[in-house]
Amino acid sequence: MRAMQLHRCGELLRAVSLDLPDPSPGQIRIAIEACGVCRTDLHVVDGELPRAPLPIIPGHEVVGRVSALGAGVAGFAIGERVGVPWLGWTCGQCAYCRGGQENLCRAARFTGYTLDGGYADAMLADARYCFKLDPRLDAAHAAPLLCAGLIGYRALRLAGEGRRIGLYGFGAAAHILTQVLRWQGRETFAFTRPDDRAAQDLARDLGASWVGAAEERPPVELDAAILFAPVGAHVPLALQAVRPGGIVVCAGIHMSDIPGFPYRLLWEERQIRSVANLTRQDAEEFLALVPQAGIETTIERHSLGEANVALDRLRRGAVTGAAVLIPEGA
């Protein structure tokens, strides 16, 4: 198989050819059609997440077709389209797994971080953590749903039922979540970099009620704010923007340090919450919601060999919507 592999954090990915073994019991082999490029991939590549076993193949927004079944796999057929998300394996035995919080399993393994991922033309995955996808979906447009969509959905659940929701950082996750909010009859307040006209235009096109810079105050108090930009300095700004009793959700796996702020910003029962990974229930609920809400993703396509280009564009904030890698011949 062909893949783009990380050998040393902070360096470019290398194009490699590897032998992919037959699937072990419980695994499926997947012929990859598309893989989204997520900010978490940047955190892995740049060494901001600890203990990545190198070399590793990044990528955890994978769409492909089942090409082989390991022993004991049920519920999947050869040729069926599947999606592979960030959560790749859990122990199933700990208190978190038994209590419906498998996203917090201390032994969990993650696609593209501690398990080889989707920056390749084929991969192996535990069938229990893969999801059937509508074969009519365009693979490239479906790829961002597997993380940007799922994490956005989990973050929204933690943000509560408020009507006015602020989204800090208008990239892959926010542009999907805005469509969910619109479908639910709620309002989006989009916070972008001051000079990011493309993101601002996309937010308005998707129905945002207000668009401004992160440092601006929205015209009304928000019920909740979700931070997708990994910028700790946005937390005090979001606390100032939400009403008493409001919730600020930090949705990234990595964020720069949160600066000190006066207690009065947290007072009046405001809350700060974080999102960690996802559960399979999140995925099942969100993927069922996608056709109901009519969600469409805005993407830019890159060949698999252009993975470093796509990552650099994401790092510089040049991607509008989501970047997606397409293996040659997919």
Image (spheres, rainbow, N blue to C red):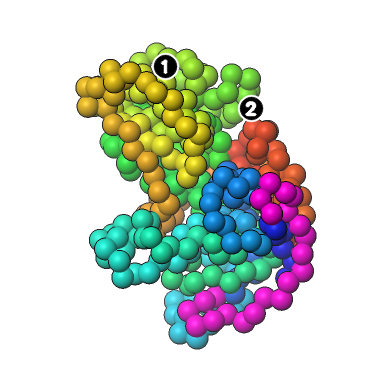
Pinpoint residue 207: horizontal percent, then vertical percent: 48, 28
Query: Which residue in the structure is indicated by mark 2?
Result: 198
Count of picture labels: 2
Is residue 31 or residue 228 the one in the foreground? 228
Give the side of residue 95 with respect to residue 28, left or right: left
Q: Quick one: label 2 or label 1, which is nearer the N terminus?
A: 2
Q: Residue at x 73, y 54 (%)?
A: 13
The magenta stretch spans residue 12:
yes
User: In this rendering, is residue 11 above or below 170?
Assistant: below
Give the magenta-colored segment's residue range: 8-28
Mark 2–mark 1 CB contact (< 8 Å)? no
Query: Which residue in the structure is indicated by mark 1?
Result: 218
- What amino acid does circle 1 point to? Pro
* Farthest-out residue, bottom: 71
Tell me the mark number nearer the camera, choosing from 2 and 1: 1
Give the side of residue 50 with respect to residue 90, left or right: right
Residue 209 appears in view: no
Is residue 83 or residue 77 the one in the foreground? 83
For mark 1, give the secondary structure: loop
Q: CA distance from mark 2 to mark 1?
A: 20 Å
Badge 1 crowding class, 10 Å Cα cut-off, few under 14, some 14 to 19, many 20 or more, is some
Answer with the quarter of the image where residue 171 lies.
Answer: top right
Q: Residue at x 64, y 27 (%)?
A: 198
Residue 198 appears in view: yes
By secondary structure, the bulk of the magenta-drawn segment is best described as: loop
Badge 2 crowding class, 10 Å Cα cut-off, few under 14, some 14 to 19, many 20 or more, is some
- What amino acid does circle 2 point to? Ala
Pinpoint residue 48: horizontal percent, then vertical percent: 56, 45
For mark 2, give the secondary structure: helix
Q: Residue at x 43, y 52 (%)?
A: 277
